[in-house]
Amino acid sequence: MRPTTRALVQHYVDALDLWGDVLEIGGHRLAKCAVQEFPAPRFAYADLNLEASDIPQTIIADITDCRATIPDSSFDVVFSSDVFEHIDRPWLAAREIARILKPGGLAITWTLFSWRNHPCPVDYWRYSAECLEFLFGDLDLLEKGYDLSDRRKDQPGFWGSGMDSVPVDQFGGWRENWAVYHVGRKGPGPAVPPFRSSDHPSARFLRMDTQGTVTNPRLLDQEPPAGITVGAQQRLVGSAKRVEAAQTAVASGVADLTEEVRALSARLDRLAGVVANPPPTDLQRVARRLRRLSRKRPGPTARR
């Protein structure tokens, strides 16, 4: 879980004095779930998933339709992190979350706006903050926004299968990582200041979106920030070409060296055979000939 997500959850737990029944959507496994954010006895934590896991309190159900499993108004908090992008029909999931929340209950949803494809098992959607507000239209909005804490993190892909891999160049892999979040309440309740307006160190990452503020240096008649000028870009391209040429030369050199190593290995194999079975010396050959002659020479004739 992101530090920003953890800090926002704690903000609302403290500000609203939350307690009671908590449902996490897609906790996946015990080491990765949010049970530590909702400790007992203050909270009674449960996880909803499509299949069993090592989380003891797992409800096997589909959040897009769980009426047969979860009654109305069952939970005080419904939480999900990096799950909504994997739900095939998120509009149904949002409706079900509103249904199973108790009056005054809170839904905290953290998902993705810009991220590399990561199918586990399927990666369906990306969301804007306005999209989440629309999906959770049955709830009163407390806060929405973007989390840019991982924005420039290099994400080339980390799975051995390569299913989450992206092209890698001189800038690295995927480097525009934006999460998006929504906090909604079922019905009226006490006023609470949004986390993004707090002085918590992580809140600054939720204030980094600049929608509504001109940032393009050309429109502002300003010099671009150092590192993204045309000249810098050209130098980076030139460096990339030189690196590519060097890689090609190294690959060619390695191929040549491999052939030389193979030839030397063959010579060493032949030499090892000679050492194991050396040819006879001149002295050994003479000795062998004398022995053969001595065997052929007739013995002395007996006197009559």
Image: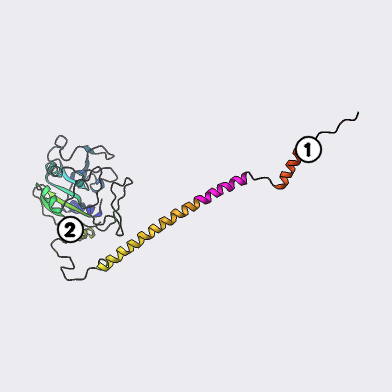
The image shows residue 150 at horizontal and vertical percentages of: 25, 56
Q: Quadrant of residue 285?
A: top right
Q: Which of 238 and 186 is in front in this view?
A: 238
Magenta residue span: 262-278
Circle 2 residue: 196
Disc 2 marks a residue whose amino acid type is Arg
Residue 282 against residue 303 in the figure, above or below? below
The image shows residue 282 at horizontal and vertical percentages of: 71, 47
Q: Residues within 10 Å of mark 2 (few under 14, many from 20)?
A: many
Secondary structure predominantly adopted by residues drawn in magenta: helix
Sequence-wise, the earlier of marks 1 and 2 is: 2
Disc 1 marks a residue whose amino acid type is Ser
Residue 220 against residue 246 in the figure, above or below? below
Check residue 265 for magenta coloring. Answer: yes
Q: In which quarter of the image is residue 286?
A: top right
Mark 1 → mark 2, Cα distance in angstroms: 109 Å
Q: Residue furthest right?
A: 304
The image shows residue 134 at horizontal and vertical percentages of: 10, 49
Determine whether, in the image, residue 274 is placed left or right of residue 190: right
Secondary structure under the numbered disc 1 in the rendered image: helix
Secondary structure under the numbered disc 2 in the rendered image: helix
Determine whether, in the image, residue 283 is placed left or right of residue 114: right
Q: Nearer the viewer, residue 17 or 161?
A: 161
Q: How many discs appear?
A: 2
Residue 289 against residue 258 in the figure, above or below? above
- Label 1 close to label 2 by CB (< 8 Å): no
Circle 1 residue: 294
Residue depicted at 32% across the width and 64% down the height: 238
Number of the front mark, 1 or 2: 1
